[in-house]
Image (cartoon, coloured by chain):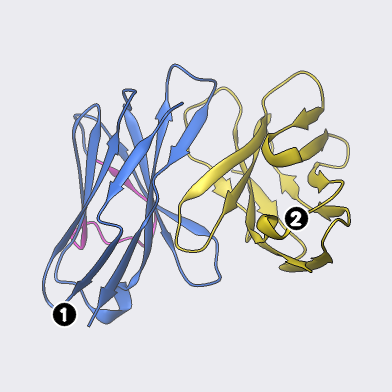
Amino acid sequence: GAVVSQHPSRVICKSGTSVKIECRSLDFQATTMFWYRQFPKKSLMLMATSNEGSKATYEQGVEKDKFLINHASLTLSTLTVTSAHPEDSSFYICSARDRGRDYGYTFGSGTRLTVV
Amino acid sequence: AQSVTQLDSQVPVFEEAPVELRCNYSSSVSVYLFWYVQYPNQGLQLLLKYLSGSTLVKGINGFEAEFNKSQTSFHLRKPSVHISDTAEYFCAVSEAGSARQLTFGSGTQLTVLP
C-alpha cells in the first residue's frame, strides 16, 4: 500500500533556530500534500496544502513566513519552521493523496517538535 | 464547506463489549467519509472509508461504519473490543470527487478497560 515517510519523528531545538521536516511518498507520486498541526488532546488543524511545482496554499491564520513549505518534486514536500519559538511546539503531520487509489489519503507518522 | 462533529470526547468500555463512536457531518455537497485511528505519538491510520455504494462499510481490525444520509451520520462500530483498540479515533469528511483536504472531527478517545 501507499506509504508516506516523515522525518524526523522527534526534534528539540533552541528558540530562534529553524527546523525542517520532510515528508516523502515512497511508492507513489503525490501532486498534493497536506500539512497538519495537532495540539495535545486536540484534532488536526490543516495548515497548508502543498502543490508540486507551485506555491503552497495556506489556511487562514497560518503565517506563511514562519511555516515555509516547499514541494519541489512529486515525492517530497518540506515544512520549515523558521525562527521557532516555544509556542510552535506541537505535533506536525503530513498527508499525501495517491492519485492511483480511490481518494486515499496516507499520513506520515508525525513529527514532535519541542522548542526550548 | 464541511464540518464534522464527534459528540463523545471519551468513551470507556470494557474488553469484549461492543462500542459505537458517533460522527455527524454537515455539508452542502456530496461527501466522502473516513474514520482514522491514531495511537500515541503516531500518524493516522485509515480504518475505513465511504465513497459510494453500500452504506455499510467494513474496515480493518473488525470495525464497520454505516453511512446514513438522512441523519448525516457515519457512526463507527465494533461488536467486541480489545485492549489494543485503545486509541484516538477521528472521523473526517471531504468533498466528493475532489482532491481537497480532509476536515476532521475533534476526535474520540476510546479506552478499553480489562
Left or right: residue A21 compared with residue B84: left
The answer to which quarter of the image holds residue A112 is bottom left
Q: Amino acid at mark 1?
A: Ser
Left or right: residue B44 compared with residue A85: right
Dominant secondary structure, magenta: loop
Task: Give residue B104's position: percent from left, percent from top.
Answer: 58, 51
Q: What residue appears at the point 32 percent right and 73 percent down from the top-left corner?
A: A89
**Chain identifier, yellow in the render:** B
The answer to which quarter of the image holds residue A24 is top left
Would you place residue B27 above or below residue A83 in this image?
Answer: above
The verdict on a common chain for dots 2 and 1 is no
Residue under mark 1: which chain is it in?
A
Q: Please state which of the two labelled residues, at mark 2 or mark 1, is closer to the viewer.
A: 2
**Chain identifier, blue in the render:** A
Q: Which residue is mark 2?
A: B82
- Circle 2 — which element? loop
Q: Which residue is mark 1?
A: A15
Would you place residue B5 above or below residue A89 in this image?
Answer: above
Q: Mark 2 and mark 1: span between their CA atoms?
A: 42 Å
Q: Where are the magenta residues, as a range?
A: A56-67
- Circle 1 — which element? loop
Residue A66 covered by magenta stretch: yes
Q: Nearer the viewer, residue B108 or A27?
A: A27
